[in-house]
Image (cartoon, rainbow, N blue to C red):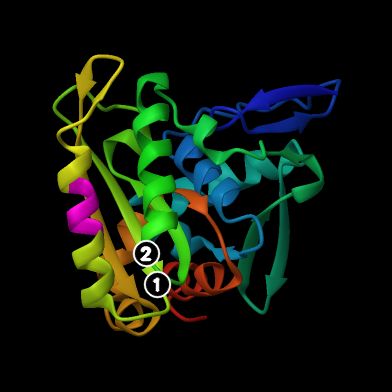
């Protein structure tokens, strides 16, 4: 078996000999794989993947065919729909999700943010890193953006998160300061703003998971299917 890196620290086993295929000939393939890897228990339709990645249906369908050829995905048919999920038997992910952040310089500040949120905000059901830091194209002016899902009151959680980020904005990590931004939503409020969360869930990196977060992400990304 070979191994193909998908996100930093995450990999998929590639069968050897490798089937003849232009695996990354489609621009959408990397984005599709990142989404499937971050949501390994969710089955996506072609339309779901197209909406989440902003690529045309035809490109998505061709990319899925290529991924199926190397056994990276499980494909099932529900009527006329093609449903796709990552092949979990081939997927390997680290126990520490923070090392999946592509740029090493953001590991320490993100870890500190997660620890303080976990210590200070009650009833957290999930934390998702999003924006340029999650995508791996951040620079020194980029914000560290996190979505936090809570079971309690949204306003209280947001106030606590704002206080934490104000403190962190003044602290240095290896001599550098970073700008932090946290969006807190309750389970109830998040369900009301599903469309607003689609891009966050489609391109984000899950740092703290739960069954509640998994269910919410599935509702948002598959349009409640």
Marks 1 and 2: which is nearer the front? 2
- Residue name at image x 77 percent, y 31 percent: 13
Relative vertical location of residue 152 with respect to residue 114 in this rendering, above or below = below
Does 167 sit left or right of 111 as displayed?
left
Tag 1, which secondary structure?
A: strand
Q: Where does the image place residue 151, in percent across and percent down from the top left?
A: 42, 78
Q: Where does the image place residue 216, in percent across and percent down from the top left?
A: 47, 73
- Highlighted magenta segment, given as a residue range: 161-165
Circle 2 sits on which residue?
A: 121
Does 93 sit left or right of 212 as displayed?
right
Q: Where does the image place residue 15, in percent across and percent down from the top left?
A: 83, 28
Residue furthest top in the image: 175
Asked whether the residues under the numbered discs 1 and 2 touch, taking CB atoms below 8 Å apart as contact, a structural biologist would say yes
Tag 2, which secondary structure?
A: loop
Circle 1 sits on which residue?
A: 150
Q: Where does the image place residue 28, in percent across and percent down from the top left?
A: 44, 40
Relative vertical location of residue 225 with respect to residue 138 in this rendering, above or below = below
Query: What's the magenta bit mostly, secondary-structure-wise?
Result: helix
Does 46 sit left or right of 111 as displayed?
right
């Amino acid at each position: 078996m070979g191994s193909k890196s998908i996100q930093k620290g995450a990999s998929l086993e590639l069968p050897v000999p490798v089937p003849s295929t232009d695996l990354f000939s489609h621009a959408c393939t990397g984005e599709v794989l990142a989404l499937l890897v971050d949501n390994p228990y969710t089955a996506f339709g072609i339309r779901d993947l197209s909406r989440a990645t902003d690529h045309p249906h035809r490109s998505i369908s061709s990319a899925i065919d290529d991924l199926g050829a190397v056994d990276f995905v499980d494909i099932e048919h529900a009527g006329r729909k093609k449903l796709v999920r990552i092949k979990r038997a081939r997927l390997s992910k680290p126990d520490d999700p923070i090392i999946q952040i592509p740029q090493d310089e953001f590991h320490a500040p993100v870890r500190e943010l997660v620890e303080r949120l976990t210590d200070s905000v009650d009833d957290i059901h999930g934390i998702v890193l999003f924006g340029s830091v999650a995508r791996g194209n951040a620079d020194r002016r980029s914000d560290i953006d996190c979505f936090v899902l809570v079971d309690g009151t949204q306003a209280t959680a947001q106030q606590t998160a704002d206080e934490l980020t104000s403190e962190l904005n003044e602290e240095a990590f290896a001599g550098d300061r970073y700008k932090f931004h946290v969006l807190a939503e309750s389970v109830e409020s998040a369900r009301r703003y599903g469309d607003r969360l689609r891009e966050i869930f489609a391109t984000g990196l899950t740092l703290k998971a739960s069954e509640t977060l998994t269910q919410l992400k599935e509702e948002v990304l598959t349009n409640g299917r």
